[in-house]
Image (tube, rainbow, N blue to C red):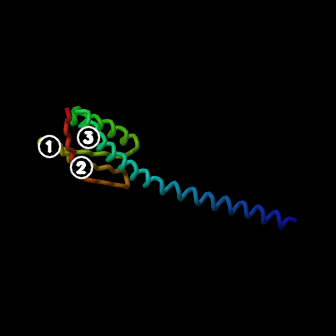
């Protein structure tokens, strides 16, 4: 009887250790996934800011500056350092935005250069 109880308790202990190991490995992998997701979200939101500003005929540079200030504060609270540089050129109906996006943390660094070309035609 003592041997059966010992076997059952040891199985539960091994099961607990196995589940503990799986959970600790998942937490480590999520940190890198979240960093990559945050970088992807930053790129998407910058692109949306350009698109919405052009579609609504709003101040593109003012909206980009406002969003960059907002996102810098958000990522600073997460422990990231964000750097976004941009330039805007307009030729006729074509607006081109050059974006240099950098997001870094203590052990990760991502950088991407985007060129966004949009043609805006106003129909009356």
**Is residue 68 among the parts visible in the rendering?**
no
Quadrant (top left/top right/bottom left/bottom right) for the N terminus = bottom right
Give the spatial CA distance, label 1 vs label 3.
Answer: 13 Å
State the separation of the CA atoms marked 3 and 2: 14 Å
Question: In this view of the protein, can residue 23 be seen by the observer?
Answer: yes
- Using a 10 Å C-alpha cutoff, classify the residue at mark 3 as few (fewer than 14 neighbours), some (14 to 19) or many (20 or more): many
Residue that appears at 28% across and 34% down = 66
The answer to whether the residue labelled 3 contacts the one labelled 2, judged by CB atoms less than 8 Å apart, is: no
Dot 1 alpha-carbon crowd within 10 angstroms: few under 14, some 14 to 19, many 20 or more: few
Residue position for label 2? 100
Foreground label between 1 and 2: 1
Going 19% across and 39% down the picture, which residue do you hit? 121
Q: Residue furthest left?
A: 91
Q: Position of residue 100 (x, y in %)?
A: 24, 49
Residue 53 on image: x %, y %: 25, 36
In the image, residue 32 sits, relative to residue 84, either above or below, namely below
The location of residue 95, given as percent across then percent down, is 18, 43
Secondary structure of residue under mark 1: strand
Local secondary structure at mark 2: strand
Dot 2 crowding, Cα within 10 Å, few <14, some 14–19, many 20+: some
Judge left or right: residue 102 versus residue 28.
left
Task: Tell me the residue that label 1 is attached to.
Answer: 89
Camera-side residue of 89 and 86: 89
x and y percentages locating residue 20 in the rendered image: 61, 57
**Residue picked out by circle 3:** 50
Position of residue 108 relative to residue 92, above or below, is below
Q: Earlier in the sequence, mark 1 or mark 2?
A: 1
Residue 13's tag is: none
- The answer to which of marks 1 and 3 sits earlier in the sequence is 3
**Nearest to the observer: residue 27 or residue 91:** 91
Residue at x 33% of width, y 39% of height? 71
């Amino acid at each position: 009887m003592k041997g059966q109880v010992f076997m059952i308790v040891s199985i539960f202990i091994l099961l607990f250790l196995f589940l503990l190991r799986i959970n600790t490995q998942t937490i480590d992998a999520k940190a890198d996934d979240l960093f990559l997701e945050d970088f992807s979200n930053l790129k998407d939101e910058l692109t949306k800011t350009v698109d919405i500003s052009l579609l609504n005929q709003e101040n593109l540079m003012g909206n980009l500056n406002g969003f960059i200030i907002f996102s810098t504060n958000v990522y600073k609270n997460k422990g990231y350092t964000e750097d976004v540089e941009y330039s805007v050129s307009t030729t006729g109906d074509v607006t081109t935005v050059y974006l240099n996006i950098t997001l870094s943390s203590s052990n990760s660094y991502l950088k991407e250069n985007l060129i966004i070309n949009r043609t805006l035609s106003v129909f009356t």
